[in-house]
C-alpha cells in the first residue's frame, strides 16, 4: 500500500470535481493480485496509474479491509475474470461502500466480451456503483452513459506530470515519426496516412515505430521502446503523427507527445 510523494503529482481539477478534497483522501485504488504490472508498456493501469493521481493503492485481495463508509474503492481495469466475479459479490453485499469501476477502451467488438464490461452490465444500475473513464463516452461507453447519466460517470483524462517533460533540442530530426497499431478498423486516420505516404516520396520523411506488443498477455516484445523510452524516442523528432482512433479519443499518445515537446 503506498502513496506517491512526488511533488509534481497532484490530483487534477477533474478529480476534485468528482470527489471533493476531503473525499480524495478516502480513495483506495485496488489493483489485481494476479497481474505482473511491471509488464505493462504504459502507465494506464495499476499502481502507476493510481500514483499519477496521488491515490493510495492496494491489492484487490485486501478488499475486505476497506468495505465500509470510510473508503471509496476505485477498481483497476486489469482484474481477471475470477476477481471481477468476486467483486460483484462484494458490491451486492456491501451497499454502504462506494465502488468506482475504471474503464478504458470503448470499441464495441473489442470490449463487449471482456469481464470488466460483463460486470458493468450486471451492476451499473446499483446505487453504490459509479464509472470512471479515461475518455469521453463513445460506442460501448456511450451506451453505458445513456443508462447511468453524467452523475454516475466521470471522464478523467490522463494527468500531466511535469517531470516527464523532455527539454527542447535543436538536434531533432526534421522527419515525422509514426507509431502504434495501424489497423484500419480502429485507427483509420493512421491507416490512411501510412497507406498514402508509403506510396509517395513522403515515405522518405516518415519513420515508423511498430507497436511493441503486450507482454502482459503473453506477447513477445517487438522492441523495447515504450513508456519513458518511447517519450525519449519521440523527443528526437520535430514532428509526430497522432490520431484519435475511430472513437475520437484523447489517447495517452497525446500526453506523451506533449512530454516529448
Image (spheres, rainbow, N blue to C red):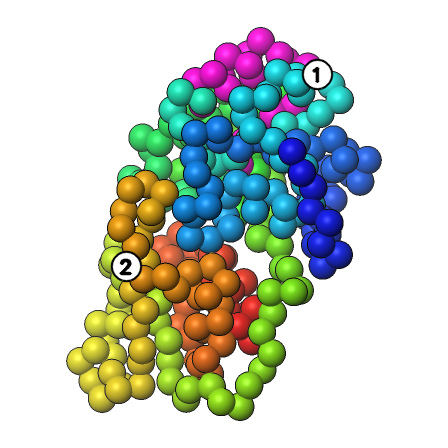
- For label 1, the residue is 68
Task: State the image coordinates of residue 248 (x, y, percent, origin top left).
Answer: 43, 56
The reply to whether the magenta stretch includes residue 66 is: no
Q: CA distance from mark 1 to mark 2?
A: 45 Å
The reply to whether the magenta stretch includes residue 97 is: yes
Nearer to me, 102 or 153: 102
Task: State the image coordinates of residue 197 (x, y, percent, origin top left).
Answer: 25, 79
Q: Residues within 10 Å of mark 2 (few under 14, many from 20)?
A: few
Residue 143: tell me if it is visible. no
- Residue at image point 30% right, 55% down: 221
- Left or right for 160, reference 225: right
Q: Secondary structure at mark 1?
A: loop
Residue 61: tell me if it is visible. yes
Numbered mark located on residue 166 in the image: none
The answer to which quarter of the image holds residue 78 is top left
Of pointers 1 and 2, the one earlier in the residue sequence: 1
Quarter of the figure with the C terminus: bottom right
> What residue range appears in magenta?
84-102
> In this view, which residue lies farthest toward the top?
93
In the rendered image, the vertical position of residue 149 relative to residue 218, given as above or below: above
> In this view, which residue lies farthest toward the left?
199
In the rendered image, the vertical position of residue 6 relative to residue 238, given as above or below: above
In the rendered image, the vertical position of residue 44 relative to residue 70, given as above or below: below
Q: Residues within 10 Å of mark 1 (few under 14, many from 20)?
A: some
Task: State the image coordinates of residue 47 (x, y, percent, origin top left).
Answer: 57, 41
Q: Nearer the viewer, mark 1 or mark 2?
A: 2
- For label 2, the residue is 222
- Left or right for 206, reference 10: left
Q: Secondary structure at mark 2?
A: loop
- Left or right for 17, reference 168: right
Amino acid at each position: 500500500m503506498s502513496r506517491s510523494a512526488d511533488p509534481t503529482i497532484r490530483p487534477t481539477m477533474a478529480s476534485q470535481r468528482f470527489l471533493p478534497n476531503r473525499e480524495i483522501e478516502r480513495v483506495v485504488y485496488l489493483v489485481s493480485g494476479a497481474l505482473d504490472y511491471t509488464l505493462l508498456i504504459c502507465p494506464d493501469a495499476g499502481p502507476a496509474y493510481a500514483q499519477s493521481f496521488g491515490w493510495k493503492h492496494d491489492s484487490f485481495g485486501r478488499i475486505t479491509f476497506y468495505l465500509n463508509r470510510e473508503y471509496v474503492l476505485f477498481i483497476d481495469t486489469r482484474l481477471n475474470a475470477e476477481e471481477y466475479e468476486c467483486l460483484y459479490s462484494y458490491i451486492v453485499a456491501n451497499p454502504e461502500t462506494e465502488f468506482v469501476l475504471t474503464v478504458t477502451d470503448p470499441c464495441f467488438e473489442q470490449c463487449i466480451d471482456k469481464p470488466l464490461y460483463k460486470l458493468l452490465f450486471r451492476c451499473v444500475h446499483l446505487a453504490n456503483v459509479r464509472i470512471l473513464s479515461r475518455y469521453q463516452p463513445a460506442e460501448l461507453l456511450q451506451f453505458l452513459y445513456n443508462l447511468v447519466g453524467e452523475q454516475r460517470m466521470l471522464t478523467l483524462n490522463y494527468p500531466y506530470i511535469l517531470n516527464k517533460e523532455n527539454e527542447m533540442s535543436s538536434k531533432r530530426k526534421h522527419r515525422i515519426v509514426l507509431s502504434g497499431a495501424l489497423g484500419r478498423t480502429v485507427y483509420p486516420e493512421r491507416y490512411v496516412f501510412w497507406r498514402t505516404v508509403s506510396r509517395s516520396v513522403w515515405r522518405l520523411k516518415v519513420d515508423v515505430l511498430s507497436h511493441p506488443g503486450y507482454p502482459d498477455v503473453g506477447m513477445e516484445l517487438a522492441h523495447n521502446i515504450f513508456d519513458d523510452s518511447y517519450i525519449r524516442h519521440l523527443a528526437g523528432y520535430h514532428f509526430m503523427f497522432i490520431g484519435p482512433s475511430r472513437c475520437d479519443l484523447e489517447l495517452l499518445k497525446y500526453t506523451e507527445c506533449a512530454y516529448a515537446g
